[in-house]
Image (cartoon, rainbow, N blue to C red):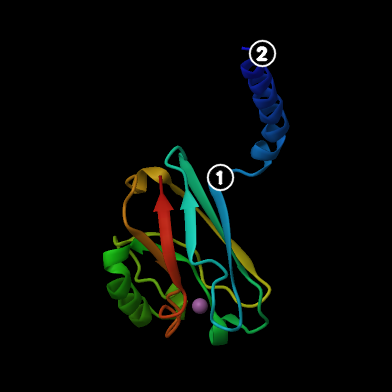
């Protein structure tokens, strides 16, 4: 009984210590970077299904301009990835390589160049818990390397 009480006390102490850290790192806000090597720094992003709103911030840590090595972050159902990429190609840079009004696009940032950052915030109600989602860069020729899984829940 005594050891159990000690365990509980230790648990409470750990909880108290952990709280300020958790308060700083909002799990509903995630970050990802792209570089001049046509790479994201993460192959997976995860947010808990308890999020009401999700914010993704994209950083371009390279030096190349957006016309040459532009990056965006586009969230789709995995099955729609190729079609959305193709439609984005036709839409061009003026549309951030996303076809205007494309219902398959769940969320997307604009295309940015080296040294820039951008964010997108979208309601989690667009997603189903445990659904199969992916993100990609729709800049021409990038998605083969620049894509990853997005898990919700
Ligand atoms: Co890119």
How far from the left and from the top, in percent, is residue 12?
Answer: 67, 23
- The image shows residue 73, relative to residue 10, as above or below, that is below
Q: Is residue 153 left or right of residue 45?
A: left
Residue underneath mark 1: 27
Q: Is residue 84 left or right of residue 142?
A: left
- The image shows residue 134, relative to residue 92, as above or below, that is above
- What residue is rendered at 43% in x and 84% in y? 140
Q: Nearer the viewer, residue 137 or 90?
A: 137
Does label 2 point to a residue whose CB lies under 8 Å from ligand 1? no
- Please, what secondary structure does the residue beneath circle 2 have? helix
- What residue is rendered at 43% in x and 73% in y? 95
- What residue is rendered at 45% in x and 81% in y? 142
- The image shows residue 1, relative to residue 44, as above or below, that is above
- Please, what secondary structure does the residue beneath circle 1 have? loop
Q: Quadrant of residue 105?
A: bottom left
Q: Is residue 55 left or right of residue 78?
A: right
Instruction: Compare marks 1 and 2 and give the one earlier in the sequence.
Output: 2
- The numbered mark at residue 2 is 2
Q: Nearer the viewer, residue 16 or 119?
A: 16
Bin the neighbour count of mark 1 within 10 Å (Cα to Cα): few under 14, some 14-19, many 20 and up: some
- The numbered mark at residue 70 is none
Q: Give the residue at the far top of this rendering.
A: 1
- The image shows residue 16, relative to residue 57, as above or below, that is above
């Amino acid at each position: 009984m005594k050891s159990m009480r000690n365990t509980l006390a230790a648990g409470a102490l750990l909880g108290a210590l952990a709280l300020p850290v958790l308060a700083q790192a909002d799990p509903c806000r995630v970050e990802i970077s792209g570089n001049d090597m046509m790479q994201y720094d993460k192959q997976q992003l995860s947010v808990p299904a308890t999020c009401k709103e999700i914010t993704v911030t994209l950083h371009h840590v390279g030096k190349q301009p957006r016309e040459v090595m532009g990056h965006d972050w586009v969230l789709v159902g995995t099955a729609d990835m190729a079609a959305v990429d193709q439609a984005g190609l036709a839409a061009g840079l003026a549309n951030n390589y996303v076809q205007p009004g494309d219902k398959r696009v769940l969320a997307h940032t604009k295309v940015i160049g080296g040294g820039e950052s951008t964010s997108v915030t979208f309601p989690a109600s667009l997603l189903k818990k445990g659904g199969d989602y992916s993100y990609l860069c729709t800049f021409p020729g990038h998605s083969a390397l620049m894509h990853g899984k997005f898990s919700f829940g």
